[in-house]
Amino acid sequence: MPAKEYISNSVIRRLPRYYRFLGDLQKEGLLKISSGELSARMKLTASQIRQDLNCFGGFGQQGYGYNVEELRSEIGVIIGVEQKVKTILIGAGNLGKALTAYFDFERYGCELMGVFDINLQLAGTKLGGFPVMHMSKLTEFCHERKPEVAVLCIPQESAGSVSETLITCGVKAFWNFSHYDINLHFDDIIVENVHLGDSLLTLSYNVNHKKCENKE
Amino acid sequence: MPAKEYISNSVIRRLPRYYRFLGDLQKEGLLKISSGELSARMKLTASQIRQDLNCFGGFGQQGYGYNVEELRSEIGVIIGVEQKVKTILIGAGNLGKALTAYFDFERYGCELMGVFDINLQLAGTKLGGFPVMHMSKLTEFCHERKPEVAVLCIPQESAGSVSETLITCGVKAFWNFSHYDINLHFDDIIVENVHLGDSLLTLSYNVNHKKCENKE
DNA sequence: TAGATTGTTAATCGATTAACAATC
DNA sequence: TAGATTGTTAATCGATTAACAATC
């Protein structure tokens, strides 16, 4: 029973973190936790935690707190981890290889169906257990199997045309590792950008400015 | 000549994106751009762009706009891309391997000095051109070469103890790929988290909730 | 019941946007 | 000079925090 109509982005972005922390607490064998205790662990305010959770419903019990397992499972349902959205990965380079090998897509709500690459040599091989197909098969595959999410591990130059093709084929969402801002070019398309370069530059900024601060 | 004392995190996080877009514009051969044009490209408001830039100084010229090359270079200086902060990478698994192979640390302000791993077999080999050393050499290496940034590509279980060691050895900042929130345990330590799981769960949430929206 | 802690409303804080005078 | 666009102040909006009544 959702309490709110509109959920802000800030709240949505915190959900996976709650989910992760509650998983850790469950592993520790904790049965219940109060917003106060959780706030101390997560370095958030108790107020914010209660506000966030109450966007989706009242999961707690006054005078007691929250049941760890129940709350985790509820958040899992809200996120939809069990939906296992059909997903394809484009680009079998170093990053694509690493993701298929070490990243557990299932655990994060996605079912990886296969990998596509322009390299003809790779077609027919396997990568992390997933079949690699040539890019020329992409359209056909999409029309038949209807993936909803595409993981983009391709260079900036190709990202524009490839994402356009994928959108035409019905792909609704991108997990984007390319240096290209897809969201800017299409509406109604869900994009989650992982701009590693931007991330490291932010770190660089902070390192370089921390130094100055200390000199004072 | 910095205009402001305190720069908010929101502004800092946008700097790398400005830097990236200005680089693209420069490649296109554009000499000047107004906040209005840039806002259209980046899907921000012109007001925000001007506000952001004026945190660091007046880089524009009334009636004209901003010089693309100059502005990009100024932002580069602000971020400190040329500082090339000394960096080590911990964990030569799939992700560590991918990062050393395909990620251009230099381009984002870091000088990668070497890679550490617990696997004795790997010690003495090279990864993406960088020497791999055994974890037992870590303390010695840090005291001698004084790296400031550590890239953590290790599992959650080891992240706690490894980060503690590194902090003792003088490491000031972490680019953290492990499922562990370092920042929670230490003060004065700079942490840039790349929680890929959280990122994909956010995407899952959006995909699963977009569907409902469409059904209405 | 008394104590604890939630759910929720109200107050505060910060970030974004709008407006406009300064100026190239 | 007139037109364009910045730099900057003021207004608005949204997110976070505080407070407290409800209730287990």
Image (cartoon, coloured by chain):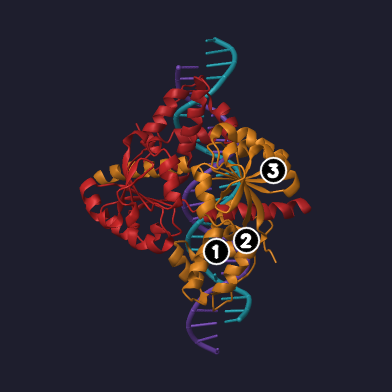
Chain colours: A red, B orange, C cyan, D purple
Return the residue found at the far right. Answer: A216
- Residue under label 2, please give it: B81
Nearer mark to the viewer, of 3 and 2? 2
Marks 2 and 1: in contact by CB < 8 Å?
A: yes
Residue sitting at 61 percent across and 42 percent down? B123
Residue A61: percent from the left, percent from the top?
Answer: 46, 22
Image quarter (top left, top right, bottom left or bottom right) of the C terminus of chain B:
top left
Is B97 drawn above or below residue D6 in the view shown?
above
Residue B25: percent from the left, percent from the top?
Answer: 48, 71
**Label 1 amino acid?**
Tyr
Dot label at residue A177: none
Q: Residues within 10 Å of mark 3 (few under 14, many from 20)?
A: few
Q: Kindly report the distance in space between the C-alpha atoms of the residues bearing marks 1 and 2.
A: 10 Å
Residue sitting at 27 percent across and 54 percent down? A138
Which residue occupies the foreground of this view, B156 or B214?
B156
| Label 3 in the same subunit as label 2 | yes
Chain of the residue displaying label 1: B
Q: Residues within 10 Å of mark 1 (few under 14, many from 20)?
A: many
- Residue under label 1, please give it: B19
Is A192 drawn above or below residue C7 in the view shown?
below
Label count reads 3
Is B71 drawn above or below residue A79 in the view shown?
below
- Residue under label 3, please give it: B188
**Label 3 amino acid?**
Asp
**Which of marks 2 and 1 precedes in the sequence?**
1
Image quarter (top left, top right, bottom left or bottom right) of the N terminus of chain B:
bottom right
Nearer mark to the viewer, of 1 and 2? 2
Which residue occupies the foreground of this view, D2 or A99?
A99
Residue A155: percent from the left, percent from the top?
Answer: 43, 59
**Which of marks 1 and 3 precedes in the sequence?**
1
- Residue B202 visible? The answer is no
Q: Kindly report the distance in space between the C-alpha atoms of the residues bearing marks 3 and 2.
A: 22 Å
